[in-house]
Image: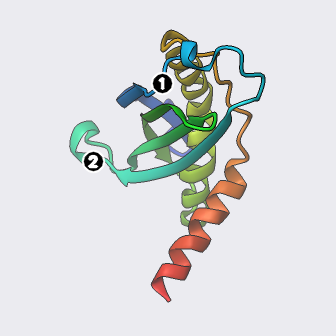
Amino acid sequence: MANENKNEQFLGIVSQYTKDLSFESINPMSHFRGIEEQPQIDVQLKVDVEKDTANTGEQNAYKVSLMVNINAKLNEPMFILDLIYTGEFVLGKFPEEIMEPILYVECPRLLFPFVRCIVANTVSEGGFPAVFLYPINFIELYQEQRGALNNTLQ
């Protein structure tokens, strides 16, 4: 990643990709014909960050992954979707105290539209009505993950 001015702050995406995708159709949609109820859809989302100097050679290179787990049921299980979508980022000249929020809030925010599209397409191609994820408040998610980590360390 070339940066014209080495003294300016920058956030660059080196690459992004589907690291893992699993879709299990437990009961096909035809099994639920005639039922008027809306399915219960449980969406779990987690952000994972790891330093990545091995592949890029950059000191401020990171892999940020959005991990999504969706379980849908209508009295009985319908489908399960697991997705890990990863972006490789290079950050420069940010103060240390804001690096963590950038990695856990801004980087996932850049990846989310692609995750949303993959989820909708996968569910639709699996024979179910598409699931469109609502916009995510990554600040709140970051605070929840931090709180959970702090609770386990105490």
**Residue 136 x/y as whole percent:** 70, 41
Residue under pointer 1: 27
Identified at 70% across, 54% down, the residue is 139
Of residues 74 and 146, the one nearer the viewer is: 74
The colour scheme of the drawn protein is rainbow
Location of residue 41 in the rendering, given as x and y in whole percent from the top left corner: 64, 37
The residue depicted at 45 percent of the width and 44 percent of the height is: 64
The mark lying in front, picked from 2 and 1, is 1
Residue shown at 38%/28% (left/top)? 21
Q: Position of residue 67 (x, y in %)?
A: 47, 43
- Please tell me which of labels 2 and 1 falls first in the chain: 1
Compared to 71, does 102 lie above or below? below
Amino acid at circle 1: Asn
- Give 120 or 36, whichever is nearer the viewer: 36
**Whether residue 59 is situated above or below residue 154 in the rendered picture:** above
Position above or below: 42 against 37: below
Which residue is depicted at the point 61% across and 42% down? 43
Q: Which residue is mark 2?
A: 53
